Amino acid sequence: MKQIIFNIKERTEKIQFPDNLGFGKIFTDHVFEMDYTENKGWHNPVIKPLSNLQMHPATMFIHYGQAIFEGLKAYKTVNGEVVMFRPDQHIQRLNISARRICIPEVDNDVLLTALNELINIERDWIPTNQGESLYIRPFIYGNDPFLGVNPANSYKLIILLSPVGAYYPEGFKPVKILAQDDYVRAVRKGLGECKTPANYAASLLAGKKAMKQGYTQVLWLDGVTQRYIEEVGTMNIFINMKDEIVTPKLNGSILPGITRKTVIHLLKEWDMNIVEREITIDEVIEKYDSGDVLGVFGTGTAAVISSVGWLTFKDKEMVINNGEAGELAIKLFDEITSIQYGIKEDAHNWLFTIEKKEVSVS
Ligand code: COI
């Protein structure tokens, strides 16, 4: 890649974190930006102070949603190092999303270098309390001012950073989930497996209605028969039953979560019977009624491992593990966060260490 241009401003005020960071409310001082045009490819990489975007009202992604994003995290370890968790997997997934939405792919090394340089500069923004981290949001959007429906000719990639705590208002306590069949999030061969705004737009109304009834999130059923459970939209779902742990098989309409992949890897390593298969909501209810459901939990970068304490479908209310976090969910949470914070050895090479470098300010 062309050399990154550093247009860094000195920080004049001390960074002050609020008591409860929550999720996605505060942002660091700088962003990485890069442009794409057909004749130049990806060019003009720059790290610069965070500022509002200026764009033409006809900018294509605003009208037709040609945009993708990723969500990954950086941590300050107990040894004072700064690490990212599985950035290679996130970059790979960003490019899978890019191909599906006709967005030009970004070279893996270019993106890794950009992440490394930006996080190095913003390392003081990484909170160190338990459960806190620096959320990294790379995104790309179609940037031409044009009202015709076709892939854009020019794009912008931005990496935005946000110090975060727990995603859900409940913190890391069990959440209440509503399975419903009034709306669908995605269908097979559609966009469900991509990280693209359309999937989140599709989820808003059902989410709002669920929240009004006291639920945190919606458990989506498949878009065709509305019998098979798929995902929660902000996390993948696992049902821990007496003789197997089941997570819905990736079928094109489910996001291939990196935390999902990590959990499957760990469960296999622990010799547990993890099965990726189709599972209906009726089967979950049946297994619950026969006392076979030991726990339900979700996995995601933002959500980490989140126990589901209550799961409802129509008039069936299931209280899972007395509304308390399940043993397996706690074990997975501890294992993954211990690796992320450098408490446990990174035996799988999941961490990428951010090089410490001095960068001169302008
Ligand atoms: C993530 O876990 O990174 C997500 O993208 C979920 C959500 C914040 C959109």
Image: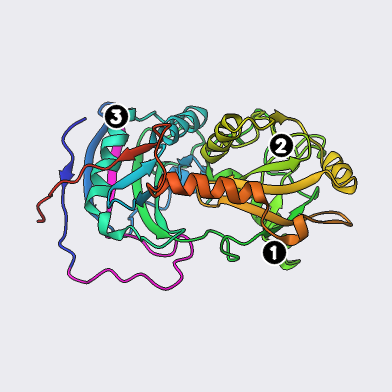
What is the secondary structure assignment of the residue under circle 2?
strand
**Image quadrant in which the N terminus is located:** top left
Q: Cβ(mark 3) to ligand 1 < 8 Å?
A: no
Say which residue label 1 marks: 211
Main SS category, magenta section: loop
Earlier-in-chain disc, 3 versus 1 = 3
Q: Which mark is residue 245?
A: 2
What is the secondary structure assignment of the residue under circle 1?
helix
Residue 192 visible in the shown view: yes
358 left or right, relative to 222: left
The residue type indicated by label 1 comes to: Met
Earlier-in-chain disc, 2 versus 3 = 3
Q: Quadrant of the rendered structure where residue 265 is? A: top right
Bounds of the magenta segment: 12-37
The residue type indicated by label 3 comes to: Asp
What is the secondary structure assignment of the residue under circle 3?
helix
Asked if the residue under mark 1 is in contact with the one under mark 3, i.e. CB atoms within 8 Å, the reply is no
Say which residue label 3 marks: 109
Residue 72 visible in the shown view: no
Q: What residue is at 34 percent from the left and 47 percent from the top?
A: 159
Closest to the observer: 318 or 23? 318
Residue 263 screen position, x and y as percent: 57, 38
256 left or right, relative to 124: right
Nearest to viewer (mark 2 / mark 3) = 2
161 left or right, relative to 68: left
Q: Quadrant of the rendered structure where residue 175 is? A: bottom right
Nearest to viewer (mark 2 / mark 1) = 2
Q: CA distance from mark 2 to mark 3?
A: 36 Å
Q: Residues within 10 Å of mark 2 (few under 14, many from 20)?
A: many
